[in-house]
Amino acid sequence: QVRLVESGGDLVQAGGSLRLSCVASGTILEINDMGWYRRAPGKQRELVAYISSGGNANLADSAKGRFTISRDNAKKMVYLQMNSLTPEDTAVYYCNAQIAWSHDWQFRDCWGQGTQVTVTS
């Protein structure tokens, strides 16, 4: 069984920073893209950033200039450094990864349970 576990969510004041972490565990053959999504209250889930296994990063416009995504392939971890946070960043942040774990080598979407980020004004 493959699991993604996030950590690092917290309550922070506007202008502050947080670093989210996500670790993949289980019988994993290979991990392709890893990324972060978020769901704000009353809104649909949206992509924040993702990074390929080779380190190519892509960020949503709302994250550019403030957030940085990185990963450690050896540790099977992905990180999201968030700076200059605003109340609009308040959301549950979900880790996502495309993981191959079975003999068919199919990459399947895996999701974490989410970590709450709350930014106060």
Image: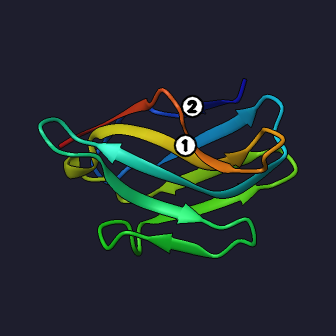
Vertical placement of residue 66 versus 30, above or below: below
Q: Which residue does the numbered mark 1 point to in the structure image? A: 20
N-terminal-most mark, 2 or 1: 2
Provide residue 71's location: percent of width, then percent of height.
71, 57
Q: Amino acid at mark 2?
A: Ser
Say which of 11 and 57 sits in front: 57
Q: How far across and how far down the image is residue 75, in percent? A: 83, 44
- Tell me the SS state at disc 1: strand
At mark 2, the secondary structure is strand
Snapshot quadrant of residue 57: bottom right
Q: Nearer the viewer, residue 18 or 53?
A: 53
Do callouts 2 and 1 mark residues in contact (Cβ within 8 Å)? yes
Quadrant into which the N terminus falls: top right
**Count of marks overlaid on the render:** 2
- Give me the C-alpha separation between circle 2 and circle 1: 6 Å
The residue at the point 41 percent across, 49 percent down is: 37
Quarter of the rendering occupied by the C terminus: top left
* Residue assigned mark 2: 7
Where is residue 115? Give x, y as percent.
44, 30
